[in-house]
Image (spheres, helix red, strand yellow):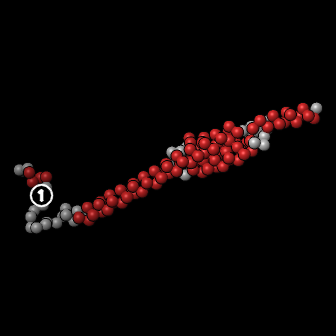
Amino acid sequence: MDNENNNNQSQNVNNTMAIVGMILGIVSIVFCWLPFLPIILGVVGLILGIKGLNASNTLPQNKGKGMGIAGIVCGAIGTLIGVIYTIVWIVAIVAVKDAYDDAKKEYNSYKKITKYSYFSVQDDTAVKTILDNYNF
């Protein structure tokens, strides 16, 4: 009876680190378009996948070996794609900020030039309006 319980328990042993590593690796790929999050998830998935693969050697029938390998592969892919997308996000934010600063500078210079031009006469010439074209 005791031997039978040990066999049942050994068959129910799961490699939790391999499972969690695989799940985090997959989630890092799914959320790869976000900045920073897939890098964190991918690295943790990669580490847990490696630990799960090493732990699978001590378990009966190498339980979790495939999930450990999947955690390593998905974690590495998620981390790589996450780094690329994070760089793209940073470059895009810097480009938008530069464009905004240039537009703001041009607007302020235009505003400074045209601030008093509506009410002043320059070079002794009359300021023309749209009503000058009509005869009353």
User: Could one spot residue 74 in this view of the protein?
Assistant: yes
- Furthest toward the right, the residue is 1
Q: Which residue is mark 1?
A: 128
Residue 37 x %, y %: 57, 49
Going 79% across and 37% down the picture, which residue do you hit? 60
Mark 1: amino acid = Lys
Task: Relative to 78, say whether 127 is above or below.
Answer: below
- Percent coordinates x, y for residue 10 in the rendering: 83, 36
Which quarter of the picture shows residue 78? top right
Could you tell whether 101 is left or right of 51 in the image?
Answer: left
What count of labels does the image hold? 1
Label 1 crowding class (10 Å Cα cut-off): few <14, some 14-19, many 20+?
Answer: few
Residue occupying the point 27% across, 64% down: 109
Q: Secondary structure at mark 1?
A: loop
Outermost residue on the left side: it is: 135
Q: Residue at horizontal 56%, vertical 44%?
A: 77
- In the image, 131 versus 26, the foreground residue is 26
Viewed as shown, does residue 64 lie left or right of 120?
Answer: right
Which residue is depicted at the point 19% across and 62% down? Answer: 118
Note whether 42 is above or below 119 in the view shown.
above
